[in-house]
Image (cartoon, rainbow, N blue to C red):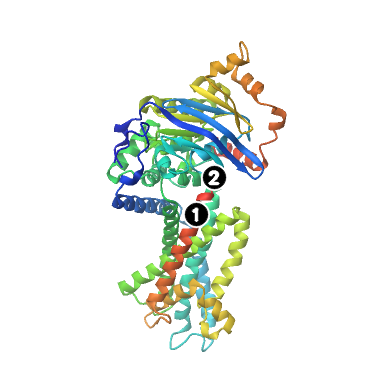
Amino acid sequence: MAKSGVHAGPPVSMVDRSIGQALGDYLLQTWGVAAAEVQKLHHDPFELLTRAVQPVLWLMLFGEVMARVRGVAPGNVPYLDFLAAGILAQSALFVAIFYGISAIWEHDLGVLQRYLVSPAPRSALVLGKALSAGVRALSQALIVYVLALILGVGIDLNPFNVLGVAAAIVFGSALFSTLSLIIACIVKTRERFMGIGQVLTMPIFFASNAIYPLSLMPAWLRAVSHANPLTYEVDALRALMLTNGTSEYGLVLDFGVLLSVTVVLTAIAAKMYGRMGY
Amino acid sequence: MPDIEANAPVAGAALSASALTRKFGDLTAVDQVTLTINQGEIFGLIGPNGAGKSTLIKMLTTLLPPTSGSATVAGYDIVTQPSDVRRHIGYVPQLLSADGSLTGYENMLLSARLYGIPRREQAERIRGALARMGLSEVAHHLAGKYSGGMIRRLEIAQSFLHRPTVLFLDEPTVGLDPGARETVWEHVLDLRDKFNRTMIVTSHHMDEIDEFCDRIALIDRGRIAAVGTPSELKTRVGPDATLDDVFLRLVADTSETETEGNYGEVRRARRAAREHG
């Protein structure tokens, strides 16, 4: 493809770029954004350690007490096992839902403008950020796994199951971090974002099957929980993570929901992210 | 991507704007700006705070769509071919755009990936660019530990890695001490001379603009109040006039425009100054 003649005669558009090359660039751009976030974590892993405190508290305090209550978890699954998958999803959710604040921070600094004047498609930028939220969440998963093993939770360490759990976490994190990015694009200031983030996490977490099954819920709350993507993430995690776990909705539906909602949110976020440069 | 260096831009207009206009509600931030900038020029944009310089640059760099009018940058239309424009321009924002929690090298690597520079060329080009900016020794230090002048040089290196035809520098020396300002300008001139690229610079330092710019445009209340070489503009005002005199004479009413920069802008400018300083 020729770059010469840019100034002589009508400009040659990039139609001669092959689809393969365009796709290669797209993946490279997405990877570039995600890799930069991973490098930041590498330079300053303190954040990951402080975030690990919350799942530890849930499992050791809440989990140990609730495990004494009979009949919360369905079937023959011990409550702590049931909870472990929910807490794994929760810790990933908490990382993801506050992710948009970094976009506001980057906007205020000027880093965002560097992204937006680059030829990278907006959706590649959004996906790169989403992917990096997934990587952060994976580090949380490692901590939850170690802790769960210590507490005697029946964890399935079959490599395929572990990979499946990793996939569910990455997709779930991508979904909620993109939702977070959309909120960031709307509220635009860190102060407002913090308020909304707090307001959102509670219903997303409690109106789901994370810490109790939907069967215990009143009908209206069950309906809300059925529309909550976190429910499907937890369902997939329970099936893949636990030795005696089963999926209530089927893994195809679980992953189908996570993927399709992520695609829709990414399309919306890509539109709004570009406008943050105004 | 092809080897861009092999295709140095040929003579012609690097940028051409025609009746470019941007409105925010009732406010017309940029009003019918028509402007041609030649290939290889260092072109200065000056004007009071809130005159519309930033809005104009945001439109030319495709960050903001115009309300009406048109412009081509590096031969591409900013409205209909934004991604082609982005491939051929570099932009050093006034705000801090290098990421302080990444090293200089990692910042460059991010740019290389965003601009689709082939993997096998990345390391060599990054090293070359850092060396040219005098940053080789600190390449693997966090950019957050750099001095203001070093960060600016890193940002210029990042914005120039893909050899843009047109490089936009928004207040590149804001908040820098005289020594660091001098070094930044030396590097900008060096890039222009070596690669024959076009530089579009905004600054509030009239001495810099006078010394380094081939031509300048004075923007006031969204309109172009005057265009010409620094000496042409000075002659227009009178013998022994400085660019400061030009600025004060041609800007409609400084006492009023002075209050135009709003609180948010002042806060940002000061923060940028602090972080670069």
Q: Residue at x 61, y 53 (%)?
A: A189
* Type of the residue with mark 2: Leu
Residue at disc 2, secondary structure: helix
Does mark 2 fall on the same chain as mark 1? yes
Residue at the image point whose x is 49% and y is 72% from the top: A230
Q: State the residue lying farthest toward the top.
A: B239
Residue A109's disc is 2
Chain of the residue that carries numbered disc 2 in the rendered image = A
Q: Is residue A216 left or right of residue B249?
A: left
Q: Quadrant of residue B253?
A: top right
Residue receiving disc 1: A271
Closer to the observer: label 1 or label 2? 1
- Residue B1 vertical placement versus B213 (above, below): below
- Residue at 53 percent of width and 46 percent of height: A277
Q: Residue at x 51, y 89 (%)?
A: A71
SS label for mark 1 = helix
Return the x and y of residue B260 as percentages of the image width and height: 68, 36
Dot 1: chain letter: A
Depicted A250 relative to depicted B135: above or below: below
What amino acid type should be assigned to the residue bearing mark 1?
Lys
Tell me, yes or no, if residue A18 can be seen here.
Answer: yes
Which of B58/B33 is in front? B33
